[in-house]
Image (cartoon, rainbow, N blue to C red):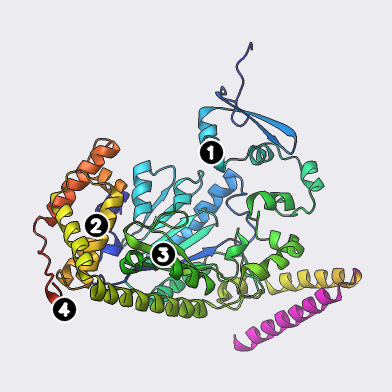
Amino acid sequence: MASPLKCDLCSKPATVHLTQIVNNKVHKVDLCEACAQAKGVTDPSGFSLADLLLKASLSPEAAVAEGLRCEHCGFTQGDFKKHGRFGCPHCYETFKGMIEPMLDNMHKGTTHTGKIPHKALDRQSITERLSKLEGSLDQAIKSERYEDAARYRDEIQQVKQTAVGQKLTS
Amino acid sequence: MTLAALLATPSELTDTASSKCAIVLMTRIRLARNLAGSSFPGWAKEKQREKIFEACRDAVASTPQMKRSVSATVDELSELEKQILVERHLISRELSGAKSGSGVIISKDQAFSVMINEEDHLRIQTLRAGFQLKKTWAAINDLDTALEEKLDYAFSPTLGYLTACPTNLGTGMRASAMMHLPALVISSQMEKVVRAVNQLGMVVRGLFGEGSDASGSIFQISNQTTLGESEEDIIKRLGSVLNSIIEHEVNARAKLMENDAAKLCDKIGRAYGILQNCHLLSSGEAMNLLSLLRLGIDLEMFPDESRCVIDRLFIEAQPGHIQHTTKHDLESNERDTLRAEKLRAEFTNFAKPKFTLNGHN
């Protein structure tokens, strides 16, 4: 080869060349020593080339094809299957349908009954929360998800009551 | 305070006064917290992670608990420093391998540490020597509440604190106790205990968490689930599981002394002899010998005050701590020489075992 291969991640000269076949597709990657170390290529059991390639060259189109995509952080359902971790707090809203059935097996219950960060929550504007909930309520009614709609309605009631409660006590 | 000064100070866990508990070495609680509207560390870009790190570090450093604390990014820490912090349970192995934009803040007394951009934006942790679930929870709850005044936590009324991994949802809390269970190990009952504990929704791990072995017969027992139960309920449930493990260990000890006193005394006596005379000692063997001596202390073969010596050595015999005592890089066998030297010195004037107590000979 005339010119040495460059590292796919940082464009230093590549010294580690790896080929993996996943689902009959050949993936090739060229890395420099440092990136190979950092990505755990040297540890064959804990390394997936597919992950690395995905992270290095994630195009939005490719992600959409894998199903749902978080509007806040661009995380997809496929990403979750690979990492077992979510992209951002909003993902819990985006991937609700996928998460809810998981929780039953994972935890003792499916509803939080512990500490509530009252101070942090009070700071987040109540009107902001209301408008968001009302939007979700409209959506739910339109798509005839009445169980969701009822839940949003209750949540709106709750938020309104807390707001009144706060005014009375302050 | 500098990191060097912190490393030169013995760990919170070696506190003499609280080293009284025979079976529970330490209590630890950690809370996973994230900032609303920011990508989790594993998904955030480096620039974002750096911004999150700064925001979190400033907020954490301004709490009263972290007055005179030490903070460092993973890039600022040497491999050895990271290893020592892992050995003291102040950072996780994950953090020591984390990408830049991650770091830790540790309180002066090493009782609190907050990891930033590990798996979650914040991993708040409190450590205490002995069996202190309620006190530990009260301490970490205060720190968390102080932080909440400065940071907007990602929180859902139904799912609780939102975490990168759904297994931490809800309270985001993992409460654990490090237990010394030599009699259950000697009498091959640990497997049974692990199974029973799992059925009660608790997890048993080795000394350094997931995937580590249980050298020195030390195990970590913690809650598995975080959603659907309040913090107080989890702690109560864990507390009762721990109490029943303590009971089993105490019974196993009594039984060994009743049926197999010679064998047990032999093990403890030999451990004492090796610690006084060894010239090469791996950390695994050191842990096991120290464990036997600690059992001897609990059985009143050695004075009660020496328990804190053992607890200190459990940490100081770890590879990172041995390396830290000298300037030049040690090979593994040189480390074993140095470890043997250190322990020989510690045990030269250690009280001789009294095997005649409790009517046994």
- Residue with the mark numbered 4: B358
Q: Main secondary structure of the magenta part?
A: helix
Residue A160 drawn in magenta: yes
The quadrant of the rendering that contains the N terminus of chain A is: top right
**Mark 1 falls on what kind of element?**
loop
Label 3: chain letter: B
B254 in relation to B309, above or below:
below
Q: Position of residue B258 (x, y in %)?
A: 24, 76
Residue that badge 1 annotates: A40
Secondary structure of the residue carrying tag 3 is: strand
Q: Give the residue type that dot 4 points to.
A: Asn
Q: Nearer the viewer, mark 3 or mark 4?
A: 4
The CA span between labels 4 and 2 is 23 Å
Amino acid carrying label 1: it is Gly
Report if residue B175 is visible in the image.
no
Q: Residue at x 31, y 51 (%)?
A: B284
The region drawn magenta spans: A143-170
Residue B143 shows which numbered tag?
none
Mark earlier in primary sequence (4, 2): 2
Question: Is residue A102 depicted above or below A166 in this figure?
Answer: above
Circle 4 marks a residue in which chain? B
Residue B174 visible somewhere in the drawing: yes
Query: Residue B218's quadrant in the figure?
Result: bottom left
Residue B11 lies in what quarter of the image? bottom left
**Location of mark 2 (residue):** B289
Q: CA distance from mark 3 to mark 1?
A: 28 Å
Locate residue B311, reporting x and y percent: 25, 62
